Amino acid sequence: MFEKGLPLLFTILLSYIIFGYVFTLTSNGYFFWLSFLMGLSLIYIAFVFSKADTVRDFSAHIPLLILLLVLLPLFVILFYVFGEDLWANSLLLVILYPVLTEEFAFRYVLQKKLLKNVFWLNAIIIQGIVYAIYYSRLLVVGGGVGFPFPYNFLMIISVLSMGLLYGFLTHATRNIYLSATIHFSIWALFPIMVVISPAAASILVPT
C-alpha cells in the first residue's frame, strides 16, 4: 500500500508535523494553514496512489462514519444553545484539523505503513510515540509555563495513551472512523471539561 507514492507521502507527513510544531511555537497563522494544507494533501495523495485500498478501507463500517457526521451538528447545536457561538463555529474546522488530518496522518498513513514492516503491536506503539512527540510542542511553547511538573509528565502520558487507543481502534476497524469519532468528541466536549474539572482538563488536552 502507498508504495509508489511513499516518498511523497512521508515528505508531506513530515511537513505536516513540522508546520504544526512551528505554528504552536510561533503562533504564526501562516504555519497553521500550511500544516492544514499538508494534512488535506495526505488524504488526496493516499487516494491517488492507493485508490483501491483506500476505497476498500473507507467503505467499511459506514455506520461509524454516519455517527461522526451526526455528532458534528449535534455538538454545534449544543454549544449554540448554551451561548458558546465561537466554539460552535470552531467545531466545523476542528473536525477537519486536527481530528481528521491527525487520524489520517498518524493512524492511517504512518501506522498502515509500519504494519507492512513490523508486528502490529509495535506499529501501534511506534505511531503512538511519534504522536506524543508531535504533541510535546505544547510542553516547550513559552518555556513550558503551561505545563509545570508534574502536569507535563501526566500530559505526555495522556497523549501517548490516547495515541495508542486510537491506534488499536484503527487497527481493529481498518479505518479511522471510530478513532476520529472519539477524538472529535473529546475536542468538542473540552470546554465543558474545563468547567467541570480544570485539573483534569490540564492533563487530558484535546488529543
Image (tube, rainbow, N blue to C red):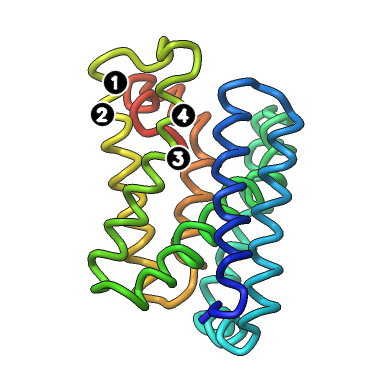
Counting from the top left corner in percent of width and height, residue 66 is at 60, 71
- Give the residue drawn at x 32%, y 75%: 117
Rendered image quadrant of residue 10: bottom right
**Spatial distance from mark 4 to mark 3, Cα to Cα?**
6 Å
Q: Earlier in the sequence, mark 2 or mark 3?
A: 3
Q: Earlier in the sequence, mark 1 or mark 3?
A: 3
Secondary structure under badge 3?
helix
Q: Which mark is residue 151?
A: 1
**Spatial distance from mark 1 to mark 4, Cα to Cα?**
14 Å
Rendered image quadrant of residue 115: bottom left
Q: Amino acid at mark 2?
A: Leu
Disc nearest the viewer among 1 and 4:
4
Q: Amino acid at mark 3?
A: Tyr
- Is 120 above or below relative to 96? below
**Spatial distance from mark 2 to mark 3, Cα to Cα?**
16 Å
Secondary structure under badge 2?
helix
Residue named by callout 3: 134
Work out whether residue 159 or residue 137 is closer to the camera in this orientation and state it. 137
**Spatial distance from mark 1 to mark 2, Cα to Cα?**
5 Å
Residues at circles 2 and 3 in contact by the CB criterion of under 8 Å: no
Counting from the top left corner in percent of width and height, residue 153 is at 25, 26
